[in-house]
Image: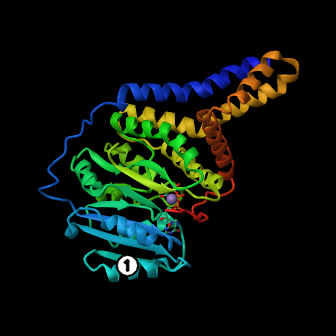
């Protein structure tokens, strides 16, 4: 009997994401952008780049080099490193770099104690003057010297309130698994953006119209996914929050602690979705659908699989059908996309449970190679 409940649960678990993926890919992924922009060449907006750092001594110089390489008018660019009491000299290194590169407008803001990324960002907001605020993690790189020009181009449309990038994973070790996961998600991010907006942004490049950022009260400090949540609030206000396919960024993948890194990020996304689905806004219906499905996929869907597996295990001894279904579930493991998916489900479930104990607003630093 139990298997008659287990089977539909398992089908639902796989059918929802696969149908959503197929639908979004067919309907939106290949569509041209329907965004009308102004002329960026005529009047480049002033951009403020904020780099939050905590113990990034190994990467901060390379990061500053990468930002400084951008071919954006230098008088329209300011860079602010906001450091939260790093113990490895990150702030000193950033200051040294600034002194060696006088042509680049870089300053360093030091916090006395570490209170988390979002609080540091909110502090940084008080010290900048750009029309567009761009957050970028120290452990990330932008692909292409025209990244900022592209951001400015998308932002020149009044419809667009926030812009992020598409992620290309980098680094030894786990990058293979990470890239399998990215293929599926990148298609969704782009398709959601073309449909209206995506509720998932990336810390490698998260650009916001400053006035909208202020309207939503700055970055949320009670949950972890500062970038995704802010973008979603802006989308709910009726502005597009997009990840265009020609804006690429790389992120260093940790060589150790990969699982705990994935779990902590999943914790933050779950916090973000639980908070976002309760916000009423005036975004079009398609975005409410996107937000609803993504929330379902991150919060509820993994548990359907667990429940199904538990029911099959409980009935396996007396049912050939349950045995066969379980065997099928295990036999599929050599197939990489399946394995990647299963790992993601496990991370989401562990993350859900860990959220009951701690929200990880101030998180452990993973060792990465950029
Ligand atoms: N100033 C400051 N204060 N910066 C911090 C702090 C802090 O307490 N904690 C982390 N950072 C900086 C890091 O130095 C890095 O530049 C950036 O914030 C992101 O931190 P990571 O440790 O690399 O986080 P992640 O990449 O695993 O986390 C991802 O998910 C988060 C939300 O779940 C990123 O996309 C983050 O940007 C995002 O907030
Ligand atoms: Mn990172």
75, 117: nearer the viewer: 75
Image coordinates of residue 215 in percent, x first then y, are 34, 56
Relative image position of residue 15 (x, y in whole percent): 57, 24
Q: 57 above or below 140?
A: below
Residue sticking out furthest to the left: 42
Q: Answer above or below: position of 330 versus 249.
A: above
| Image quadrant containing the N terminus | top right
Residue 6 lies, with reference to residue 212, above or below; the image says above
**Residue at point 22%, 46% (across, down):** 157
Taking the image as shown, residue 64 lies to the left or right of residue 261, namely left
Q: Quadrant of residue 274?
A: top right
* Left or right for 325, reference 176: right
Q: Who is closer to the viewer here, 253 or 11?
A: 253
The image shows residue 17 at horizontal and vertical percentages of 54, 30
Q: How is the image coloured?
A: rainbow
Q: Which residue lies at the image location 59% right of the left edge and 51% below the top edge?
A: 174
Q: Residue furthest front?
A: 172
Quarter-wise, where is residue 236 in the image? top left
The residue under label 1 is 97
Q: Residue at x 17, y 53 (%)?
A: 40
Q: Residues within 10 Å of mark 1 (few under 14, many from 20)?
A: some
In this picture, is 61 found above or below 47?
A: below
Residue sitting nearer the eye, 355 or 302: 302
């Amino acid at each position: 009997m139990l298997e008659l409940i287990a089977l539909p649960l398992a089908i639902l678990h796989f059918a929802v994401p696969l149908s959503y993926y197929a639908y979004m890919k067919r309907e939106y992924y290949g569509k041209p952008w329907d965004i009308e922009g102004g002329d960026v060449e005529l009047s480049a907006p002033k951009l403020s780049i904020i780099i939050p750092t905590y113990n990034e001594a190994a990467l901060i110089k390379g990061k500053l080099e990468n930002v400084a390489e951008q071919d954006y008018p230098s008088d329209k660019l300011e860079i602010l490193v906001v450091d939260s009491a790093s113990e490895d000299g990150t702030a000193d290194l950033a200051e040294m770099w600034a002194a060696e590169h006088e042509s680049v407008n870089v300053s360093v803001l030091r916090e006395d104690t570490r209170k988390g990324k979002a609080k540091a960002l909110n502090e940084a907001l008080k010290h900048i003057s750009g029309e567009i605020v761009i957050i970028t993690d120290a452990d990330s790189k932008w692909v292409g010297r025209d990244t900022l020009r592209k951001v400015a181009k998308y932002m020149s449309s009044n419809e667009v309130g926030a812009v992020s990038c598409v992620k290309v994973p980098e680094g030894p070790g786990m990058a293979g698994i990470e890239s399998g996961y990215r293929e599926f998600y990148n298609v969704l991010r782009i398709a959601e953006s073309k449909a209206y907006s995506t509720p998932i942004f990336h810390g490698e490049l998260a650009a916001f119209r400053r006035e909208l950022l202020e309207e939503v009260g700055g970055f949320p400090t009670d949950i972890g996914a500062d970038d995704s949540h802010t973008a979603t609030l802006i989308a709910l206000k009726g502005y597009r929050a997009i990840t265009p396919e020609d804006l690429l960024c790389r992120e260093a993948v940790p060589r150790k602690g990969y699982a705990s890194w994935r779990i902590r990020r999943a914790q933050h996304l779950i916090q973000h979705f639980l908070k976002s689905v309760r916000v009423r806004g005036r975004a079009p219906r398609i975005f409410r659908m996107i937000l609803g499905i993504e929330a379902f996929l991150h919060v509820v869907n993994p548990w359907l699989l667990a429940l199904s597996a538990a029911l099959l295990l409980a009935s396996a001894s007396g049912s050939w059908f349950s045995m066969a279904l379980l065997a099928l579930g295990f036999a599929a493991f050599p197939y990489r996309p399946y394995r990647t998916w299963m790992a993601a489900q496990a991370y989401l479930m562990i993350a859900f449970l860990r959220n009951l104990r701690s929200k990880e607003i101030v998180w452990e630093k993973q060792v990465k190679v950029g």
